[in-house]
Image: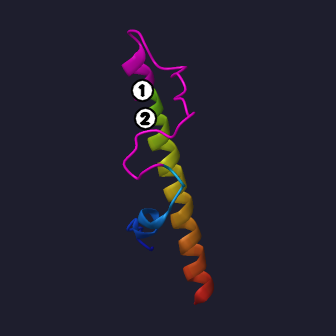
C-alpha cells in the first residue's frame, strides 16, 4: 500500500490571498445539525462503535475466506 506524504497538497494553489488565511472571502461555515445531545449520547456512540466493529469483523472474515479460496485455486 502506498503512503501519502502530503507533498502534492503543499503545492496546490487555490488562488486565495495567502496560504495561512483561515477563510476565503464569502465562505461561511455551516451550522452543525443533527449533533448528539442529552443523556443517551454516549449510549448511542457506543452502539455505533459496536456495530462498526461487527461489520469490520464480518468483512475481515470474508476477505480471509476469499484469500483462502485464491490460494487453493493457485495450487
Q: Position of residue 28 (x, y in %)?
A: 54, 29
Given residues 58 and 23, the one toward you in this image is 23
- Asked if the residues shown at circle 2 and circle 1 are in contact, with their CB atoms under 8 angstroms apart, the answer is yes
Residue ranking furthest to the bottom: 75
The residue beneath circle 2 is 49
* Residue at the (40%, 40%) spot, across then down: 22
Mark 1 Cα-neighbour bin, 10 Å: few <14, some 14–19, many ≥20: few
Mark 2 Cα-neighbour bin, 10 Å: few <14, some 14–19, many ≥20: few
* Residue at the (50%, 50%) spot, across then down: 16
Q: Is residue 41 above or below residue 19?
A: above
Given residues 72 and 1, the one toward you in this image is 1
Q: Secondary structure at mark 1?
A: helix
Q: Quadrant of the N terminus?
A: bottom left
The residue beneath circle 1 is 45
Residue 72, label in figure: none
What segment is highlighted magenta in the picture? 17-46
Given residues 19 and 38, the one toward you in this image is 19
Amino acid at each position: 500500500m502506498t503512503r501519502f506524504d502530503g507533498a502534492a497538497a503543499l503545492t496546490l494553489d487555490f488562488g486565495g490571498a495567502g496560504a495561512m488565511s483561515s477563510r476565503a472571502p464569502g465562505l461561511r461555515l455551516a451550522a452543525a445539525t443533527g449533533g448528539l445531545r442529552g443523556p443517551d449520547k454516549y449510549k448511542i456512540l457506543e452502539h455505533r462503535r459496536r456495530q462498526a466493529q461487527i461489520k469490520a469483523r464480518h468483512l475481515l472474515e470474508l476477505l480471509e475466506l476469499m484469500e483462502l479460496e485464491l490460494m487453493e485455486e493457485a495450487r
